[in-house]
Image (spheres, grey):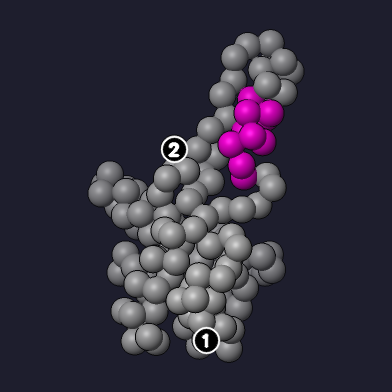
Amino acid sequence: MAAVDGDYNHDKTPEIFDAMSMFLSKLKERPIHVKSPFWNMTKTEMIEWYINQGHNKEWLKMSYSCFTGNKYQCGRCSSCLRRWVGMYNNGIIEEYEEDPITWERIPEYIKRMQARTGKHDSVGRRREFLLAMEKAKKV
Ligand SMILES: [Zn+2]
């Protein structure tokens, strides 16, 4: 599983991973451990780690993150934005239906991240978001 720093979905917590481990171990009658090696990494750091391992960037681009489920990633949902931040911070440019950096909600995200008011925004998540905004000359 690939839960990262700043994930707050109910299906991506250490407690749920422990529960899944117990369930799968019972079901398969052998020890199965569900865990994420990326709990302490942001998406930016995870992508950097992937690249530094010598893995193919094109394979990374074949992954899919968009909440819409459409053929092409929308560039207008929070998942596309987080993906764009991680990729952009690592110099990977991708195509979206709409360029995420032009999303009308970007100023709202910047304000929230700078004010540290987002209840689910970790230090790492804020840092990677603001780094991407600096690189894109939005702040
Ligand atoms: Zn999307």
138 is higher (above) or lower (below) than 132? below
Quadrant in which the N terminus is drawn: top right
Where residue 68 appears, as percent x and y from the top left, is 69, 68
Q: Kindly identify which numbered label has been placed on residue 36.
A: none
Q: Nearer the viewer, residue 47 or 128?
A: 128
Q: Amino acid at mark 1?
A: Pro
Q: Amino acid at mark 2?
A: Pro
Q: Which residues are magenta?
A: 12-21
Q: Nearer the viewer, residue 133 or 28?
A: 133
The residue that mark 1 highlights is 107
Where residue 62 appears, as percent x and y from the top left, is 48, 58
Quadrant in which the C terminus is drawn: bottom left
Which residue is painted at 69% across and 11% down in the image?
Answer: 29
Q: Dot 1: within a 10 Å radius of its alpha carbon, few (fewer than 14), some, or many (20 or more) residues?
A: some
120 is higher (above) or lower (below) than 55? below
- Residue 35 is one of the magenta-drawn residues: no
- Select label 2 or label 1 by which is in front: 1
Where residue 23 appears, as percent x and y from the top left, is 72, 23
For this view, does 129 lie left or right of residue 109?
left
The residue that mark 2 highlights is 37
Q: Nearer the viewer, residue 66 or 139?
A: 139
For this view, does 131 lie left or right of residue 22?
left
Beta carbon at label 2 within 8 Å of ligand 1: no
Q: Dot 2: within a 10 Å radius of its alpha carbon, few (fewer than 14), some, or many (20 or more) residues?
A: few
Q: Earlier in the sequence, mark 2 or mark 1?
A: 2
Q: Is residue 94 visible?
A: no
Rounded to the nearest angstrom, the CA distance separating label 2 from label 1 is 32 Å
